Amino acid sequence: MQDCVGCNNLHMDAPQRTGLRDRKRRETRARLEKAAVTLVLRDGLEQTTIGTISELADVSPRTFFNYFDSKDSAILGLRHVEITDESVSDYVVGEEGNDLVGSVVHLLFAVMDAPLSRSAIREDRIEIVRRYPQILAGQLTQMTLMTGRLSEAVQGLLARDPRFCPLSDAEQSAYADLILAMCVGAVRVAIRQWAGAGLGDPDEDLEQRAIWLVKETVGKLR
């Protein structure tokens, strides 16, 4: 029987179709991110709009919102991170035995997705943050919206730390919220200091700076 190109397309394996769809989505996302960064550096933050980003990326504004919820998210490459029960459980297991403050800070940066340190347009994003440090508010807001799920992850870490055992559920929740608040505050300060001072490579410095801020502050309060 003679093969039919149309039939071959119809009978394309589901994983192959999914892979092609995912690749196209990644390409569209990359175009939007590149367009956003290019326009901000060329025209400024205020002059850059979702409309101009979409036009340069050759997509509709409606398509833009399939990938990002704001122009700031596109500029920084922010992805929405959903913290599920499975991801919380996997993260807690992965961090077992590590330093508690370091684990919490690491979790926060993971939620923020650290786009500045992994993108091919990293240097351009760093320049944008230095010019417009207020743009980082989106990352910090994302952490705030996930406070409940983050607190559950921190409670999982506390359950494995002998310094916090045994605790009632209420005590564990209270300690988790307090530790989380301190670490979120330290991340905010570390990012603000980095952006204001125009420091260098953020890959490890920001995370380590936030960890140091928490421990140094707690030490001085003793």
Image (cartoon, helix red, strand yellow):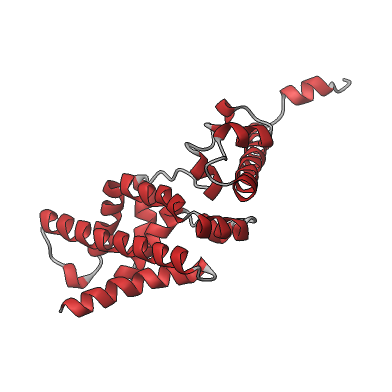
> Residue 171: image x %, image y %?
12, 58
> Residue at (57%, 40%) from the top-left corner?
48
Q: Quadrant of the N terminus?
A: top right
> Residue at (86%, 23%) from the top-left corner?
3
Q: Taking 191 as reference, is 68 left or right?
A: right
- Quadrant of the rendered structure where residue 109 is? bottom left
Q: Nearer the viewer, residue 64 or 152?
A: 64
> Residue 166: image x %, image y %?
13, 65
In this rendering, is residue 130 above or below 210? above
- Quadrant of the rendered structure where residue 98 is? bottom left
Q: Nearer the viewer, residue 69 or 165?
A: 69
> Residue at (52%, 57%) from the top-left corner?
131
Q: Taking 199 as reference, is 20 left or right?
A: right
Residue 124 visible to an observer of this rendering: yes
Q: Nearer the viewer, residue 154 or 140?
A: 140
> Residue 32: image x %, image y %?
62, 40
Q: Taking 207 as reference, is 182 left or right?
A: left
